[in-house]
Structures are given as C-alpha cells and as structure tokens.
Image: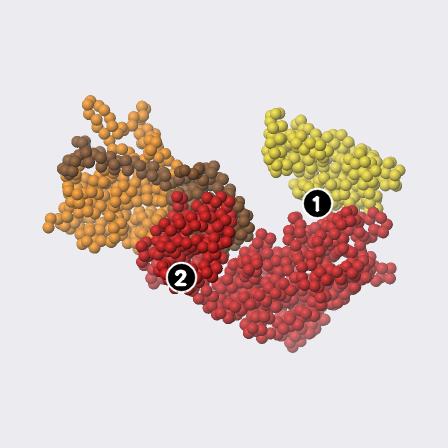
Chain colours: A orange, B red, C yellow, D brown
Amino acid sequence: MPKPKVAFYWCASCGGCEETVVDLAEDILGVVEKVDIVLWPVAMDFKYKDVAALADGALFATLLNGAIRTSEQEELAALLRRKSRYLIAYGACAQLGGIPALANQFSREQVLRFNYEDAPSVVNPDHTRPQVHFEEAGRTPHLPEFRHVVRALDQVVDVDFYIPGCPPTPNLTRAAFEALLSGNLPPKGSVLAPDVALCEECARKASKPTNVAFTEFKRPHQALWDSGQCFLAQGLVCMGPATRRGCGAACPQGNMPCTGCFGPTSRVRDQGAKMLSSLSANVAARDEEGIRRILDGLPDPVGTFYRYGLAKSLLRRKVNLPTGSNGH
Amino acid sequence: MKATRDEVRIGFYVCHCGHNIAALVDCPAVARYVGTLPGVVLSRDYKYMCSDPGQELIQQDIREHRLNRVVVASCSPLLHEHTFRSAVEAGGLNPFYFHMVNIREHDSWVHTDRILATEKAKALARAAIERVAHHKPLEIKKVPIHPDVLVVGGGIAGIHAALTLANAGKKVYLVEREPSIGGHMARFDKTFPTLDCAACILTPKMSEVGSHPNITLWTYSEVVKVDGYVGNYTVQVKRKARYIHEDLCTGCQDCIANCVYKEPKFADEFNEGLGKRKPVFIPFPQATPQVVLIDPEVCLNFKRNKNPDGTPVVSDKCKKTCVEACGERGAIDFTQKDELREIRVGTIIVCTGFQTFDARRVPAYGYGIYPNVYTALEIERLVNASGPTGGEVVLRGPKNPDGTPRKPRSIGIIHCVGSRDKKTNLWCSRVCCMYSMKLAHLLKEHTGAEIYNFYIDIRTPGKGYEEFYNKLLEEGTHFIRGRVGEVTDWAMTPEEEGKLVIRVEDTLAGVVRRIPVDMVVLATGLEPRADAAEVRRLFNMSCGGDGWFLERHPKLAPVNTFTDGVFLAGCCQGPKDIPDTVAQAGAAAAEALALIDRGYVEQEPNTAHILDNECSGCKSCIPLCPYTAILFDETRQKAYINEALCKGCGTCVGSCPSGSIVQNLFEDEEIFSEIRGVLAYD
Amino acid sequence: MKYAYFPGCSLKGTGRAYEESLLPVLRHLGVEVQEIEDWNCCGATAYMAVDEGKACAAAARNLALAERTGLRQMLAPCSACYLVLNKAQHYLNEYPAMRRVVTRALDSVGLQCRGDTAVRHPLDVLLHDVGLDAIKQKVTRPLTGLKVAPYYGCQIVRPYATFDDQANPESMDKLLAALGATVVRWPLKTKCCGGSLTGTLPEAGLRLSYILLKEALKRGADVIATVCPLCQFNLDSYHAKIAARWEPVRIPTVYFSQLMGLAFGLPAEQTVLHRGMVPLRFEPAPAAHA
Amino acid sequence: MTKEWSPRIVAFFCNWCTYTAADLAGVSRLKYAPNVRIIRLMCSGRVDPQFILDALARGADGVLIGGCHPGDCHYVEGNYKMLRRFTLLRRMLADLGIEPERVRLEWISAAEGEKVKRVINEMTEQLKALGPLGLPRKFAEWDREVIALAREVQDREAAAGPCPERPLTPEPQEAVHA
C-alpha cells in the first residue's frame, strides 16, 4: 500500500505554522515514515502543474495554513480542496482569519495607500501601485487580485477539520496525524483540540478568587506581573476563560496572558462577544460613570477580543467600509 | 440529542380572541403561512383558544396527529401560558414542548396597519416554530413551603392577618417598628361610618395578638435583611434596645411615677406632640405589649453624644429612682444593646401602612404659622377621652378672662390637603371625606361650634357612607364646595378680628367668600412612607409611579406581588379605609394559607446548570449570582450550581465565556432560533 | 460672581431710589454687576396682554444682549422685568411657534437668543450667593427697634418663585432680621398692591393699597419694605386720596436695599431716604461693638 | 424590495418589568410603530452580546434591550450586569462602524406602558434617519468577489476540457508569495 500523500500549503501566512511542523523535531521522522510529503512550498520546489496533474482526491490530507487575502490563494485553496480527501485548516489564520484578519478594520484603499505611499519608510512620489495586469514588451505579466476582505479558509472552500493555534503546538499536530492515519476522526467540521477553556490546564487557576471584581484594567507593558498569580486577578485581560485549551497554557507559563489564539469552544458563536460579556459583567462599579472609567482600561476592544477571530466574528468586518463591488 | 428537524411534529394555533386579534391580524393568512413552515404538521386558526373547546381541540390534535410540539399565537404568556401548558399536558405531552406567541398585547392592540400587523404576527409565529423545535421536556420543580409566616407591620392589617393565620394554627412572627402595635387606627377616636370607638374594637384584637400562643410579637423591631426564595425565606430582624426586659416588666408603671422627672416634659409622639411624656414611658394606655421603654435621647442616665456607631453612651449620672421603684423585678437594664435575630419563614405579608401628608408643604393653609391650625390626626387625639386634653377641644393662645382655655365657636375643616393636586400628590386619598365628616360630627358634639367643611367632591363610596353624609347635613354642618385658597389672620371686618379667615371660592354660589373661624382642621391625605423605597427593596417588590407598592395585578391579584410568597395588605399598597384594609389582610392571610396547606410551590423549571465536562473552572460566573447559587468544587476544580437556590435569571449563562452553562427553556439555541424567526421578512 | 444687570425703565424713572440704593449695597458686598449695553423696555405685563409675539421679542432682545456679554447670570431687580424676562425665556423653550417668531425678529437685527440665561432676583442673589453671614458682618448700624413689614408683591413669587415659597416667602424676612430689624408678621406680604388699577380704576386699586397700609399699621410696623417700584409708588404716593376716601394710614414705604444701606452705614445719598413721599425718619445708632 | 424600507428592530425585554410594561401598553391600547419584535427573557442580565451581534448580522437595523430600573431588578442585580456589558459593547460596535443609536438600553418598569410606546416610536424615527444597516446584503456584496472568481475558474476549466493534464492556468510566472 503506497504511503498516503500529504501536502502542506500556506496562504496569507507568517510562516510560523511551517516552523511548528519542523518543531516536531525527530518525531517528523515518524511522520515521514508513514506519509509521503508531496507538496511543501517552504521546503520543496513545486509547480502548479504538478498539483494540477494530480488526480482528484489523490492527496490524503492537506494542511493549509494562513488566511485568504489574494485570488491566487483562493485558486490554490480550491485546487487543493479538489485534490485532497481531507482539507484541514491548520492554525488560527486558516481557522479564524488570524492576525491578518485584523485588517478587516480597514478598506483595501487604506491598506494599499499606507503600504505603498504613507508608510514612513516609503518614497513613492508618483504613487505607483502594483497592477493586476501590465503590458510591457509584448508580455503581460499579472499579479493575483488583492481582495477587499480577509477570509478564513472555510469562507472560501469546504473544510474537513481545524487545527487551532498560532501556531498549533507540535503535540496537537502529532495527535492530528495519528487521528488521520488511524481513521478514528470526530465528525466533519470538528476542531482537533479539547473542547474546554484554557483555565482548566493553567497553573495560575488556583490563585483566581471566586469573587473577582475589576476596579481597573492594565495592559502588559504597564506593570511587572507576578509569575504565579492569575492575570485576571491582577487586572490584566487574559482571554483564557474564552479560549480552547490544548497548548498547555504556553503563554501564561511565559508570564504573558493568553490572547485567545485557540479560538472559542464549540458552544460559542462569537469568541469576542462572549469574553466581552464575561469580563465587563464582573466590573466592580454600578454607576454609569464608574463603569466607563474602569472600562477606559480597554482602549481597543476589537484588537483585544478579536485578535485572531475578526474574520469569523458575527460582524466579520467593520461594516461601513466600502464594499468590493464599487471597486475603490 | 436534540430532536432533528424531521422528528419534530408541530401543531400551530392562531387565536382570533373574538375581535381582539382578528380585527387587525389576518389570522387565516397567518395559519396558512405557518402551515408551509418545516416541522409544522397542523396549522389552524380558531376563535377562542383559551376556551374549553379550544383547549380540547389541542388535546385531540395531539393524539390524532401525534404532535410532539404545540405553539399557540394569542395573548400574553403572562396571562395564559399556564392554561395552555395544562391543556398540552392533558393531551399527554410534556407541558414544556409548548411555546406561546404574543400577537395581542404586542401586536393587534398596539398597531393600526393591518398588513404590517399580520406580517409581524407571521414573523413572531415563525420565531416560535423555530424555537419550539429545540425545546426539551422539563419537569415542574416542587419547592417545600416552610409553614411559618412573617407579618411586617402591626397596624390593623398586620393584626388581622396575624390573627387569621394564628387561629388557623400557623406560627406567625409579627414585627412592628413602633414600641406598640395598633398603627394609625390606635390613634383614632371613633371610626366612620358607625362611629364605634376605635379603641373598643381594636384593643381586644391587640390583646388577642399579645397573648396568642402562635404569634411571636416583636415590637420596637425592624426587618433588616431577607434572603432565600418562596417557601424558604431567611429573615434578619433587628430588635432595638428598650433598656427594659420585656419578660420581666409587668406594666405596673411604678418606674414612670418615680422617674426623676416629676412632670412629663417631652413631646409625646403618640399624641402628635400635643401631650407630654417622661423619658421612661408607655406609648398609650392600651399599648401591646404592656411594657415601658426608655428614650435614650432624653433620659439623664445617657450622655447626649453617641458612640461612633450611633449607639447611646450610658453616663450613669442619674439617681435611677426608676430602678429602685422597679425593685426586685429588675426589669430595667441600661446595658441592653440592639440585637439581631434570624428566623426562617415560608411566606411574608407586608402591611407597613402609610404616613399622613406633611401639612407644612402647603404654607398657604398656615399650619405651623397659626397656632389654631391643626391636622386631622391632632384632632383625633384632642377629641379622644384618653387624649392629652381628656377629650376637651380647646384653643391655643389667649385664655378666657377666668383663666379657662377658650373653646372654639366655629371650626373649618379643609378636605384634600395635599391630595388631588399637581404640586403635591395627584391621587385621592379615599378616606379624608369620610373622616372629615366624622370629625365634623365629633367636634359638633364636643364643642357645639358651627362646623364648615370645604370640599371639592364629597366621596362616600362605602356601605353606609352616603347615609352618614346625610346625617351630617341634617346636623347642620355647612358644606362649602371649593378648593380653599388661603387661611389668614388678616381681618377685613370687625367680626373677623382675632379669628382665622378662610378665603375660598364657593363654586356653587359663584362668589369668593371669607369665612372667619376659631379653629382650622386640615384633612391631610395619605402618602407612601418616607422609607418606602428601602423597605420595598428588602422584599424585592417594585412600586408604581406614585410610590405605593405595586401589586401583581390591580384587579385580579391585588394582594400578590411579583415575588412569589410575598403578599401585600392595607395602605402600603394604596390609600384605603379600615374595611378594605381588613378585607385585604384576610385575603393575604388566605393566600399564605393556600401556599402553606398545599405544602409546596411550583417553580418554573428555568434554572441553569453547568455542563460538567465542559466547565474549565475559570470562576468568572461565581461572583455574578446574587443568590450565591454558584459554588466552586475544589476537588473537581469546576463550578456547579445549587439548583435549589438558582432563580433562573440567566445572568451567568449570558456571561459564561466558554458557553458551558445552560438555562432550561432559555437555551442559546432556542434564542438564536427565535432571532432568526423574528427577522424573517418575506 | 458677576451679573449682567438689567435695570428696566422704572429704576431709571420713578423707581430711581431702588437702583440708587441697590447698586452701592451690592458694591459694598463685593458683588460685581455690568449694565447691559443698549437694553430696551421689557414690555412689562401690559404689553404681553396686547401682543404676545412682539412682547416676547422685545423681552428676548434683552436676553440676547445679556447672552452676548458672556455672563451666565442676569440680575433683574424690578418685579415686572423679573417676571417678563422669565416668562419670555419660558415661552421660548416651551413653544416652538414663539421661538420661530422671536428668532425671525432677532435675526433681522443680527441677534440670536439661546434662552439659557439664569434670570435672578436680588433677594435670591443676596441670600444664596452672598449669604446672610456675609451681610451680617457688614452691618455697622443694626436697625434695632425698627419694626418692618416685608412686602414681596405678587410678581416675583408667582409663577417663577424658584428661590422662595409662593404662598409664604421668607427670604426678605430673613434678610431684614439679619439687618437687626424686627420683622412684623404680616399675612398680606404677597397680596396685590393695586398695580396699574390705581391709575385706571382708582376705586378698586386704591382700596387694595389702603388695605395693605392699614394692616401694616395695625401690626405695629414702622415702615413697609418692598422690592417693586410699582408697589412702592402705589403705597407711597396716594396717601392724600386714601385719607380722603377712607382714613389716613401714613406709613413710609421704602426699598429693602435702602434699609440695607442704612444698616451698612452708607451715606444719605446712597440710602436716598429723602425720595419717599412719606420719608422714613430713623437714625440707627452705631453698634456697641464694632 | 417591493415595499419601502422601514427599520427592523429586535427587542429583548425582561419578563418582570419591560415585557409587562409592553403588555400594559397593549391593555391600555396605546398605538406605536410596528417595527419592533419582542423576544422575552427572564432578565436583562440574560442578554448575551452574541444575541445582539447575531440579530444585527441577520438583518436587524437596531436592537432594543429593556430592563428594570437599577435597584428594582427581580433578581437584584441582573440589570447592572447588562449595563456593564452594554457600556463596553457600544464602544466596540462604534469601532466596528455601527452607530451608537442602533443598540439601545432602556430601564422601563412594569408601570411604564407609556414609556415603551415613547421609546419604540423614538428609536424607529432615529433609525429611519440613519437608514438601513442591512448586513446580509453587505455580506453578499463582500462575497461577490469570491463567487465571481469561482465561476471564472470553472469556465476556464470547462473551456480547457476534461483532461486533468491541462495546466490550470496559462504558463504562470513564478508565483510570488504574499
């Protein structure tokens, strides 16, 4: 029986999810024994036609990481979907839109103007911009379309499973492979991680009081944080209560609060709204003025509560931005 | 597992409610529309769903069409949800596989456009159809009722309620803030319309309360905290220090006789300050319990300054002749402190009464400026044989040449003082016309003076009231119809010299009149007590715009409140006379007895529970519960809810960051589906 | 505190004594006033009855001028002006139709009126902003022995008596007591003095003045203290006619500010007692202790 | 949309106060705009911000939450919790481009039927001035760019024939990774 073919691909990605596959260290050998990695752009050369040449469903599984921002990424996602038996959204960007999706707070024009004109390091007096089609010397090179909206993978193609994390931890990847190879998989659309919040495996849980009442909120740079006490008890926002566990509370161990990269549990439709609800309900003040003063400690609610999940939030995007149809 | 779409067999009924709904909502169209929705196997419109045939129709359909869900679109669930649930149960289906749609109070009665109202009805119905598919079978929870009852307030309402319950064999705690029970009624001389003496009909009931084995009487005490829920209230009562041991004092009043103060010197609250009392005193002769108390504000054995926490400081400077007089009974104890007592009861009856309108708030009538302007309550004390003047109605100010106090030869009684007035209280206080006429009769009897009653409308709504009014007319009382403008001592003519002139527009005669009188009586109205807001929050009650405690339904549930197990009686719910107060007291007692005898109360099974294997133990929900129903299990490192304490508000469910708490009947899925439904605009 | 000062016609005419005595008293107490530039007649109660729109526009013009000074508080000593300015501002805020009429009128002269200035009465300012203690300190010649009947008139207590009770005002009583005078209890303190009837229907108007004067004397008052130029005029200048028709009831009527000047020991040209038809002859002795 | 647009408001009313006040408005036959559709919850504290976002995402132009006056909550403090959530949610919605008037919190006691009418009429007028939020339509517009591409790819392949061997696109240059 020939070894099942596996593909890794990356779209709007920072490369972290590629890194984490390598972090499997020697376990990667165990993986390589059982599967045949046929596509891994960061590690191996590849051509479109090689992928296109594959028969539909020839790939046993594709782990696709990174959000979808350009037309080429959409094409590859669609192609790999057709070629793979299991298409897996690997990492927060593919699952929820990730950090790139924070750009959904800005229009395409704002993004392009900043990057190609207003950024301090840019000198572009005649406002040149990358063109999708360009005629020159008989040749018409073209670039992928830069979409107005950043999307998660399942907003473009049908996805079988999700592996959360920014990046997913090695043991999560290993468990995913074992599940795929052994065939005992949860129902389609499941997230391959425990369905309980992070606090369950966080060492600081014991120090969180049962009567937390926030009198103020501070941000990481504003104080030296006790390395044993629950961050929320110290008045620092930690997304742990609203985020899946599975990472072994890596950030809290590194004395940094959880920022919510594993996404919500299956019972929650909007991770940001849920954390907002839980956090604000426990604010100490009862009068409007007092409440406002305490909440001033959260200057950027969207960035705090939707750091990874804006694309998959119920509103998906800042609603009054110009839409794709009228082009600008 | 949630019932998937195909297993759900929904029966939908839209009610015409006669014309109430059908007048604006096209019921057949709604029925047709809902008939097309997935899961709906039966969709009817019917004239009166809440009628017996309507309910039988449901039961029949359940059996015939094997329905496992029922939705009725008619009036407010607060009105008939219970009726239809019972019908569904009678049809053999779990009553919670039912959901109700309000298309009357929230649709046909409040809108005018037929098309839009019908469209709204369709959407609301669709919301219910989508919601009911997610409903789960639930069981009504039965909560045992503690048989003891707390009655708050010892006026005639509290007394009657306590006696009714005690005579039914229930154990009653009667808590009264004043040193004695009796309330306002104990201060009245006679009562209208029969003119029987207030003390004669009240004192026997008071002593019956004082000696009843089933009644624990705590006077000079206040409720400070109420916890728990219907059937299981824990109440903390603060017993203020009397500096007298109640069980040792026999009421002989030797201590009063031997007090260092030979003569009573201090204003006596019971007589509205007209009489005087000593630092050690008994409020009034028939006080129950027959026990004295010491006022630390004026007793020489106490310092004038207070401890930081407000409690009096014993100076021990007095010869304490009172202690000597008490002798071996040793009832006096200056070291007594306020004490907190805790009791467990199943039901509570609140009858905290009213306060009279402060006449100073209408300076035009001169109360507090002219000495011979009295309030009605002051007159009740003056004409009372046990009052400060032994029933003699005399004028303040200059005496007769022979030194005897002057008697009034003409008296003006002004109705509606503070009532029916935009600047003060808008409502009619219901009793002032009757007690003004009673006082007119008594004053005539005591002084033979000419009596003038100034009224806007004479209101005699009770039994024998109109006859009493005719009796007053026959006695020659002058009734002048007009809102009195002013009481002044400015005399325009010689016969007005030295008198109080009442200026009024006599609307029947059509002329402004000046009527000089010796004495003016202000029939002040009734208003909620100054601390009504704190008291009602103790018992989780709300109040109407006017400040009176709010009953569950003005017509159909006048003694119930929105909190199960807490009942109202008497004037705390609105101005009323003694017959209505006693009737309400009886009704409240009956409501309490009904709960106690049934032994349990049904609680809506909408409590919340935490999904055990999904809770991360993040403790975010624990501080949210005002009933401390959410606890943290240290061993399993997870939170759990004590469903006996949970009241089903759902606040923790809305906040749980990992969605691990579920509220029966209001699950997230059910509400999301309802949102989807109401936003269906075809 | 600084106030935009609106004197009104009377304080420059028959009621001159009111302004002549009030301004030095206010200065003496450290209260700054700035007379409004180019103020116009407020229309008093008469004009309101003739044409409400024009009257309101005339009054609103003064409000607009006051707003232009940037001072949030406006001082209107004369009772009629106090009533009309408050009423105009009340109409502006309550009735959009009136607001439109006034706005159009003021636009034509380049003015606009927000209608949010606080129109204050001197009694209100003296009691609540200056305070009785500060006034007591300034009393060098207490009016001991002087029995005064406080007369408020009808316009400052109704309907805009925000600073005192409508039926039984006591702010002037307290002020006079602070000056050392004995305040006579007098139930007619807010009854009508006859107003303009003394000119139009003397039979009715004079009788009302007579009633006030008679009762004041009967109560043992030496002088009536008033706040309104029209009341002062009515009570002070018809003694001959009243004596002819009823009986002589000679008692002086002065402005409360004149008594304040007296108690503060201000010079005669600042208490202008000579302006009264029935002059007040009272020399308060300097207080024993300074 | 054949009919002229009129604001769609989803209301979450607490059972004890605002829902009862709405019943009272009905019993008193007060007339008000039909734009609100009421969902009954036991307490305003049960209103999960997810409900508000979901309602907006499904086409509501405004969301109205009704609770008991502070101090009157049947469950003692539920309304305070809602006030806290509402204060932060409104800020976040403003950052996401949703005008504050679209989500409103009102304290309405069981005796204030009149206030239910006033608030609903007032909110309807405000939203009429603001215009529709219409998120479903916006979502569809945003996604048009993806659907357009999918169709373009299918057409190209259909034109290229069934043989899977044919390369996906004309000789592409080296794909530039974003």
Q: How many marks?
A: 2
Q: Residue placed at 54% from the left, 66% from the top?
A: B591
Which quadrant is the N terminus of chain C positioned in? top right
Height in image: B26 above or below D76? Answer: above
Height in image: B10 above or below C263? Answer: below
Q: Amino acid at mark 2?
A: Gln
Find numbered disc 2 in the image and state the secondary structure of the residue it sits on: helix
Q: Which mark is residue C166?
A: 1
Q: Residue placed at 34% from the left, 56% from the top?
A: B8
Q: Which mark is residue B60?
A: 2
Height in image: A65 above or below B323? Answer: above
Q: Residue placed at 20% from the left, 22% from the top?
A: A137
x and y percentages locating residue C282 in the rendered image? 82, 39
B17 to the left or right of B330? left
CA neighbours of label 1 inside 10 A, class few (<14), some (14 to 19), many (20+) = some
Callout 2: residue from which chain?
A: B
Q: Are marks 1 and 2 on the same chain?
A: no
Farthest residue to the top: give it: A137
Farthest residue to the bottom: give it: B328
B485 to the left or right of D31? right
x and y percentages locating residue B139 in the rendered image? 40, 63
B18 to the left or right of A5? right
Q: Amino acid at mark 1?
A: Gln
Callout 1: residue from which chain?
A: C
Task: Inspect this view and state whether residue B627 appears.
Answer: no
